[in-house]
Image (cartoon, helix red, strand yellow):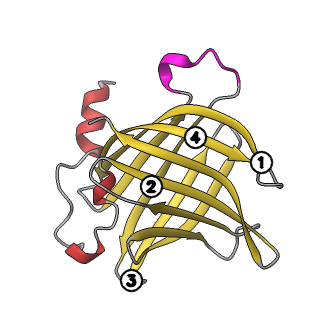
Amino acid sequence: MDPQIFADALLSPAPHADIPPDQRIFEPFIGSWALEVRWYGPDKALIREEEGEWHFARVLEGRGIQDVWIVPPRGRREVSAYEYGTSLRFHDPALGAWRSTWVGPMHGAVLTFTARRNGDAVVLETTSDVAPARRWSFRDITPSAFTWVHEAREGEEWRLVQSFAARRLA
């Protein structure tokens, strides 16, 4: 199979016209990003730090946004503790939000989220069938950088699990 035929069928140059402009909340992330990824323990102490890469593209006639998240970057795959996964998101007009599914084959993870704009942030919250509840937030969004935060629900509190500092590459 020619991989370019698949890529041409999947990738889209523009958002679909059915997605209202005020709902195109993932558009700022289209492109490629260098990451500084940090993991935190239950005591909030930093337990691991790695570089990574994150790539976002419009897919499925522009109705969806897909990403590929890779830690450490592909050029440094000699590390045995690596992660490589993808999220696929699409706008659901009936819900008035985006549905998102994360697939992380290295850890057998499949997580489902609902995403909405919250002020200047984009916040994804796990669906009710996911335990513990998780919240992923894109914050401090500029054309050249953003922060991403992963939190897990512990009782009545949100605990910081992971953070990314992203810098645009292309």
Circle 4 packing at 10 Å, graded few (<14), some (14-19), many (20+), is: many
Q: Is residue 79 within the magenta segment? A: yes
- Of the numbered discs 3 and 4, the one sitting upstream in the chain is 4
In the drawing, does residue 116 fall left or right of residue 47?
Answer: left
Amino acid beneath label 4: Val
Q: CA distance from mark 4 to mark 1?
A: 14 Å
Amino acid beneath label 2: Leu
Location of residue 24 by image quarter? bottom left
Across and down, in percent, residue 157 comes to: 75, 74
Q: CA distance from mark 2 to mark 3?
A: 17 Å
Residue that badge 4 annotates: 37
Q: CA distance from mark 1 to mark 2?
A: 31 Å
Is 133 located above or below residue 80 in the figure?
below
Classify mark 4: helix, strand or loop: strand
Mark whose residue sits in front, 3 or 4: 4
Residue that badge 2 annotates: 88
- Of the numbered discs 1 and 3, the one sitting upstream in the chain is 1
Circle 1 packing at 10 Å, graded few (<14), some (14-19), many (20+), is: few
Q: Which quadrant holds the N terminus? A: top left
- Of the numbered discs 1 and 2, the one sitting upstream in the chain is 1
Residue that badge 3 annotates: 96
Q: CA distance from mark 1 to mark 3?
A: 37 Å
Amino acid beneath label 1: Ala
Determine the residue positioned at 71% across, 41% down: 107
Mark whose residue sits in front, 1 or 2: 1
Label pair 2/3, CB-CB below 8 angstroms = no
Q: CA distance from mark 3 to mark 4?
A: 31 Å
Range of residues picked out in magenta: 73-80
Mark whose residue sits in front, 1 or 3: 1
Circle 3 packing at 10 Å, graded few (<14), some (14-19), many (20+), is: few
Q: Is residue 48 within the magenta segment? A: no
Amino acid beneath label 3: Gly
